[in-house]
């Protein structure tokens, strides 16, 4: 059985929508804990990104790149 470890915390879905696509493109095993129920009743702990422990370093690199990029271009 795969062990999943927490990697990041978000408040709203729009904060990680692009990150989700980046992780999927790299075939990282992940899920967002509290993602569905947060829309009904927000959890104080937020939405937690959990990744396969074996892929955690690769996922951290993707997360770091994601944080350093500006994906939205407003002109």
Image (cartoon, helix red, strand yellow):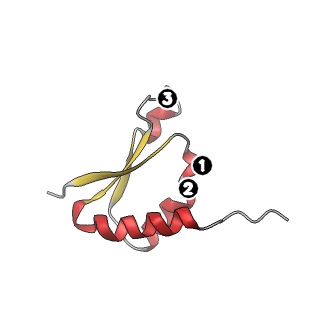
Q: CA distance from mark 2 to mark 3?
A: 18 Å
* CB atoms of marks 2 and 1 within 8 Å: yes
Q: Is 24 on the left-hand or right-hand side of 74? A: left
Q: Name the quarter where the N terminus is drawn.
A: bottom left
When asked about the image quadrant of residue 52, the answer is bottom left
Q: Is 69 on the left-hand or right-hand side of 5? A: right
Q: Quick one: SS at disc 3? A: loop
Q: For label 1, count other residues whose C-alpha is less than 10 Å away and answer few (under 14), some (14-19) or many (20+).
A: few
The answer to which of marks 2 and 3 sits earlier in the sequence is 2
| Res. 42 mark | 3
Instruction: Return the residue found at the far right.
Output: 75
Q: Quick one: SS at disc 2? A: helix
Q: Quick one: SS at disc 1? A: helix
Instruction: Return the residue found at the far bottom.
Output: 26
Residue at (50%, 69%) from the top-left corner?
65
Residue holding disc 2: 17
The answer to which of marks 3 and 1 sits earlier in the sequence is 1
Residue at (53%, 33%) from the top-left corner?
39
How many numbered marks does the figure carry?
A: 3
* CB atoms of marks 2 and 3 within 8 Å: no
Residue holding disc 1: 14
Q: Where in the figure is residue 15, as x and y percent of width and height?
A: 57, 50
Instruction: Return the residue found at the far top.
Output: 41
Q: CA distance from mark 2 to mark 1?
A: 5 Å
Q: Is residue 4 above or below residue 55?
A: above
Q: Is 15 on the left-hand or right-hand side of 9? A: right
* CB atoms of marks 3 and 1 within 8 Å: no
Q: Where in the figure is residue 62, as x and y percent of width and height?
A: 44, 69
When asked about the image quadrant of residue 23, the answer is bottom left
Q: For label 3, count other residues whose C-alpha is less than 10 Å away and answer few (under 14), some (14-19) or many (20+).
A: some
Q: CA distance from mark 3 to mark 1?
A: 14 Å
């Amino acid at each position: 059985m795969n062990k999943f470890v927490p990697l990041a915390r978000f408040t709203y879905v729009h904060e990680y929508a692009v990150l989700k696509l980046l992780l999927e493109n790299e075939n990282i095993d992940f899920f967002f804990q509290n993602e569905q129920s947060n829309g009904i009743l927000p959890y104080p702990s937020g939405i937690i990104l959990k990744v396969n422990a074996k892929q955690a370093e690769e996922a951290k690199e993707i997360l770091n790149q994601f944080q350093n990029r500006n994906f939205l271009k407003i002109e």
